[in-house]
Image (cartoon, rainbow, N blue to C red):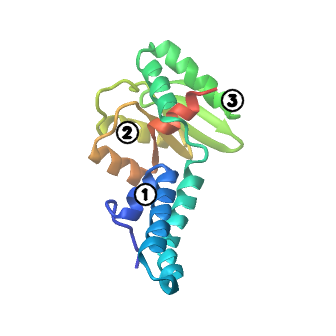
Amino acid sequence: MKFKMSENSLYAVLLRSPWWLSLLVVAVIVLASGALLPAAYVPFGMMGALPFLGIALVAAWRQRNAPNPARVAEVLGQAAVMSWHAFSALIEAAFQRQGFVVTRLQQPGADFQLVKGDRITLVSCKRWKAANTGVQPLQELAAAQAALGASASTFISLAPVSDSAKRFAKAGGIHLTSVNELAQLLTP
């Protein structure tokens, strides 16, 4: 049986929130225990803060390399007004900084081929400014991946993809680049 945490549970919300919020909950529990419980029960009340301390540590670990939200908004704003020529050059340079050999493709569904070692990844990013993204560009990327024998594929877009496109990407093993990942990629 696979256990899954509810997305709206307190723990899930705190995991998505800044790590210091969980530490704030720890402080409130510890202070309330010290102020409201008899002295003999204070340590037991303070133990109630341990799960929140664990969540603070996990959230801090996950957020250690996350870009600043203001920086994310700035980078994405700049990307949204770029021409395809400028954006594609920026994407190409970003992947080259990560050690990939980048080849521009003239193939429907894929814009770049990334090679690192024996792993070939296709990247589709020409529709980065689309207002919304459906299944069609992902189907084209999957077809290009099959035609070129690539081991992986990545789709880059500033706008969120539809639920059906998310399901298609998950079923086809296509990585949907999040806005945070894109901001990290585009930041030199």
Image vertical order of residue 69 relative to residue 172, above or below: above
Question: Mark 3: which amino acid?
Answer: Arg
Residue 33 locus on image (x, y percent) = 46, 73
The residues tagged by marks 3 and 2 sit, at their Cα atoms, a distance apart of 26 Å
The residues tagged by marks 1 and 2 sit, at their Cα atoms, a distance apart of 32 Å
Q: Residue at x 43, y 37 (%)?
A: 141
Mark 1: secondary structure: helix
Image vertical order of residue 86 relative to residue 75, above or below: above
Of residues 104 and 30, the one nearer the viewer is 30
Q: Earlier in the sequence, mark 1 or mark 2?
A: 1
Q: Horizontally, is 131 left or right of 38 in the view?
A: left
Of residues 94 and 173, the one nearer the viewer is 94
Question: Mark 1: which amino acid?
Answer: Leu
Pointer 1 residue: 14
Residue 128 locus on image (x, y percent) = 41, 26
Question: Which labelled disc corresponds to residue 138?
Answer: 2
Image vertical order of residue 83 relative to residue 173, above or below: above
Question: Which labelled disc corresponds to residue 77?
Answer: none
Question: Mark 2: which amino acid?
Answer: Leu
Label 3 or label 1, whichever lies nearer to me, is 1
Residue 179 locus on image (x, y percent) = 45, 36
Q: Residue at x 40, y 79 (%)?
A: 1
Q: Dots 1 and 2: beta carbons under 8 Å?
A: no
Of residues 161 and 71, the one nearer the viewer is 71
Pointer 3 residue: 97
Residue 46 shows up from this direction: yes
